[in-house]
Image (cartoon, grey):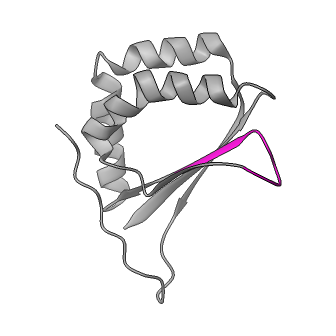
Amino acid sequence: MIIDLRTYRIAPGRVPAQLDLYGKLGYPVQLRYMGEPVCYLVAESGALNTLVHAWAYDSAGDREAKRAAMMQDSDWKPFLGENAKAANIVEQHTSLMTSAPFAPKLTVPKPRR
């Protein structure tokens, strides 16, 4: 299993707008392909204006296939366009990670179709 861990730095004061945009247009589409995220977090201290979310996949190939299918979904394109237009995201960092041997085992969520 791999975890796609994403960290986004959002323009100051724009976190609520980004969460609203993603919640309405992006999240419903991602659920169809990825299932529920492992987590979706908003910074309360430290590096404020930061969103972090993690998605679990069976393998790199599973991630690639699910993301490719999502990119072909006509409902995903409006989110991408509105997200670019809003310009809330200042920086994105993506890390593909694996669990340590002693960590609790995660399960890959089933997509909502």
Task: Tell which of 60 and 82 is nearer to you.
Answer: 82
**Main SS type for the magenta part?**
loop
Residue at the spot 42% in from the left edge and 12% down from the top edge:
78
In which image quadrant can residue 19 be found? top right
Q: Position of residue 33 (x, y in %)?
A: 27, 40
Residue 59, x across and y down, in percent? 34, 61
Quadrant (top left, top right, bottom left, bottom right) of the N terminus: bottom left
Is residue 1 part of the magenta span, yes or no? no
- Where does the image place residue 22, in percent across and percent down from the top left? 50, 27
Left/right of residue 6 with respect to residue 79 in the rendered view? right
Q: Which residues are magenta?
A: 44-53
Camera-side residue: 95 or 40?
40
Q: Residue at x 35, y 45 (%)?
A: 64
Q: Position of residue 79 (x, y in %)?
A: 45, 18
Q: Nearer the viewer, residue 59 or 27?
A: 27
Q: Residue at x 25, y 37 (%)?
A: 32
The residue that appears at 21% across and 41% down in the rendered structure is 112
The quarter of the picture where residue 113 lies is top left
Q: Against 95, is 67 above or below?
A: above
49 within the magenta span: yes
